[in-house]
Image (tube, rainbow, N blue to C red):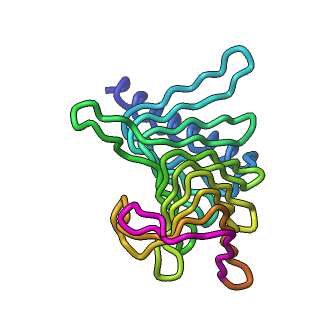
Amino acid sequence: FRDSLFLADSTRLADSLAKADSLALLSKSSLEQPAFTNAADSIIEVFTDGQRMVYYYGPTTVKYQNMELTANYMEYNMKTGEVFARGVYDSLSGEWKGRPVMKQGKDSYNMEKLRYNFNSRKARITNMITSQDDGILHGSNIKMQPDKSINISNGKYTVCDLEEPHYFMTMSVVKVVTEPSQKTVFGPAGLVVEGVHL
């Protein structure tokens, strides 16, 4: 009977110590709130040879300020404050699953790969699709700046919601500015219909 009371007390003590330790770490963290909130499969931490890397397998969610990022695979470099996210290739279906989706405020961005630095708030994105001004903007090489502006090279703008749109405007360079009001500025553009450049 005494042993079971001791076990209950030590369990309660261990729980309160774990909470106190995590609160102390959170107060020392450079993030304003916890970043990684979920990893469905597994988490691997590598702290050898000066590394400070954390690998997240399975659907993972990161929340930071007004940004939320989900993907099926993430790497977090604690030294640089950079997260890398991508989907996972399913060999049975022959397609990628759980590609990164980033939500910032009311905007949503679907992409193939993402590198985001929490310190500089800059992102480097590969193959992104986002809705802009009642249309859909595709881009192959994208840089997102701290002021939430987006620089895109090799972009497409369309209202066709297919992954490979039937018609679109091809644009060599695009800049999307959100502050003080949303504007899209682009360089040379051309119309493409059913794969034919007009």
- The stretch drawn in magenta includes residue 52: no
Question: Which quarter of the figure has residue 147?
Answer: bottom right
| Residue 108 appears in the rendering | no
Among all residues in the image, which is located at the extreme front? 198
Q: Would you place residue 73 above or below residue 23 in this image?
A: above
15 left or right, relative to 196: right
Q: Residue at x 42, y 47 (%)?
A: 99
Q: Would you place residue 105 above or below residue 17 in this image?
A: below
Q: Residue at x 56, y 38 (%)?
A: 18
Residue closest to the eye, 158 or 13: 158
Among all residues in the image, which is located at the extreme bottom? 181
Residue closest to the eye, 158 or 146: 158
Residue closest to the eye, 69 or 160: 160
Question: Which quarter of the figure has residue 87?
Answer: top left
Instruction: Pinpoint residue 128: horizontal percent, then vertical percent.
Output: 52, 56
- The stretch drawn in magenta includes residue 189: yes
Tell me which secondary structure the magenta stretch mostly adopts.
strand
Question: Which quarter of the figure has residue 192?
Answer: bottom left
Instruction: Pinpoint residue 77: horizontal percent, then vertical percent.
Output: 66, 35
Q: Residue at x 71, y 42 (%)?
A: 81
Residue closest to the eye, 70 or 46: 70
Instruction: Pinpoint residue 23: horizontal percent, then vertical percent.
Output: 64, 47
124 left or right, relative to 1: right
34 left or right, relative to 7: right
Instruction: Pinpoint residue 137: horizontal percent, then vertical percent.
Output: 51, 68
Q: Which residues are magenta?
A: 182-198
Give the quadrant of the N terminus: top left
